[in-house]
Amino acid sequence: MRLAWFVALLVACGGSLAPAPAPGSPAPAPGAACVTTGCSGTVCGEADDGRMTTCEFKPEYACYRDATCARQPDGACGWTQTKVLSACLNNPPTM
């Protein structure tokens, strides 16, 4: 019963039971899409990278609602750093 609850919570939060990629793994092909994942929508990664997050919300997480999750110059998925995103993270909205 506990395992079923854990798996349901894990899936609801955008995670999976797949192992995370090893550090230093080669970046996927440049054409692969990046997606916003995680329970609070703060992870920018590959659709199947196996990351999971806790289900919590912090004021700064609201800054990612309008941010761009895209392939970065180094080939990895990540949040595109803009003045708007930086300003929001430095002074997050109040809840």
Image (tube, rainbow, N blue to C red):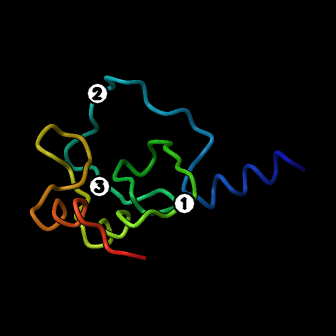
Q: Nearer the viewer, residue 3 or 92?
A: 92
> Residue 79's x, y, as percent?
24, 54
Q: Residue at x 9, y 63 (%)?
A: 83
Query: Does 64 sit left or right of 75 as displayed?
Result: right
Q: Amino acid at mark 3?
A: Ala
Describe residue 27's horizontal placement relative to residue 20 as left or right: left
- Residue drawn at x 69%, y 56% as measured from the top left: 9
Q: Is residue 84 above or below residue 49?
A: below
The amino acid sitting under disc 2 is: Pro
Q: Secondary structure at mark 1?
A: loop
Image quarter of residue 34: bottom left
Q: Which residue is mark 2?
A: 26
Q: Quadrant of residue 13?
A: bottom right
Q: N-terminal of the two: label 3 or label 1? A: 3
Q: Quadrant of the C terminus?
A: bottom left
Q: Residue at x 63, y 41 (%)?
A: 17
Q: CA distance from mark 3 to mark 1?
A: 26 Å
Residue for badge 1? 56
From the top left corner, tell me how far across and down residue 7 is, in percent.
Answer: 72, 50
> Mark 3 and mark 2 in contact (Cβ < 8 Å)?
no
Give whichever of 33, 7 is nearer the camera. Answer: 7
Separation of residues labelled 1 and 2 (CA atoms): 31 Å
Residue under circle 3?
Answer: 33
Q: Amino acid at mark 1?
A: Glu
